[in-house]
Amino acid sequence: MQNSYKIFIPVDGIKYSDLFDWSDPTQKCKVVQTTIQRPGLLRQNSRTGSLINCNEQKIALFRHGEDVFAINEKCPHAGGPLHLGDIEEMPDNTLCIRCPWHSWRFDLLTGKVRMPKGQNREAKVYPVNVAENGQLSIGFDEFNARYFSGDIDF
C-alpha cells in the first residue's frame, strides 16, 4: 500500500484572491499588470498564471473558479514558461494549460499532454490547499534535497 501523505508548504507573497480567475469572463478584459516584489513570488500578471518558488521548485499557479492548480513552470516539451500560457477548456471539459511557445496542452489535473496527440510527455502537477483566509499551500512528496545539503540559507 502506497503512502499518500504529502508535505504541504505555504506559498509566501500571494493569496487565493490575488490569482486571476480564468473562469470569469469579466476578468479576461483586464490588462493591468501588477508586479509584487516579495520572497517566493517571482512574477504576477493579471492575465497570466502566477510564477512562484516553493520547495526550491518554480511552479505556475492558476485559478479557475474555486479551483487552484499548480504545475511545474517549465514545459516538458521545450522548457517554455507555462505561467505565461492560457487555460483552455477541451471538448471533454478538461482544463489544460497551453504552452505559449509551441501550443502544447497539458491537463491541469494530471499533467498529461492532451495536444499534440500521441505524445507521452507529462508535466508535474501538485495538489493545492486553500485555507479559509486565502493562504495557499502546495503539496510535495518530500522536501527538496537542497534543504539538507547546506546550500540554502533559511
Image (cartoon, helix red, strand yellow):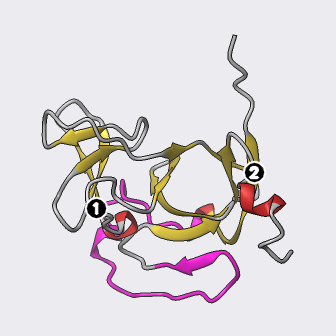
Task: Name which residue type carries label 1.
Answer: Asp
Q: Amino acid at mark 2?
A: Phe
Instruction: Rate crowding at label 2 as few (under 14), some (14 to 19) or many (20 or more) other CA atoms within 10 Å.
Output: some
Q: Is residue 115 left or right of residue 5?
A: left
Q: Are marks 2 and 1 in contact (CB under 8 Å)?
A: no
- Crowding near pointer 1: few (<14 within 10 Å), some, many (20+)? some
Dot 2 or dot 1: first in sequence order is: 1
The answer to whether residue 95 is above or below residue 101 is above
Q: CA distance from mark 2 to mark 1?
A: 29 Å
List x then y, in percent, for residue 35. Answer: 52, 88
Q: Provide residue 8's location: percent of width, then percent of height.
A: 74, 47
Which residue shows up at 24% across the image and 49% down it? 105
Secondary structure beneath disc 2? loop
> Which residue does the numbered mark 1 point to in the structure image?
86
Residue at point 83% right, 77% down? 153
26 w.r.t. 142: above or below: below
Nearest to viewer (mark 2 / mark 1): 2
Q: Residue at x 73, y 37 (%)?
A: 6
Q: Residue furthest toward the top?
A: 1
Q: Quadrant of residue 135?
A: bottom right
Q: Is the residue 50 above or below the residue 115 in the image? A: below
Q: How many marks?
A: 2
Magenta segment's dominant SS is: loop
Residue 143, numbered label: 2
Is 28 a magenta residue? yes
Q: Per the image, is 21 magenta?
A: yes
**Residue at 63 percent of width and 89 percent of height:** 37
Tell which residue pokes out farthest to the front in this image: 149
Q: Which residues are magenta?
A: 17-44
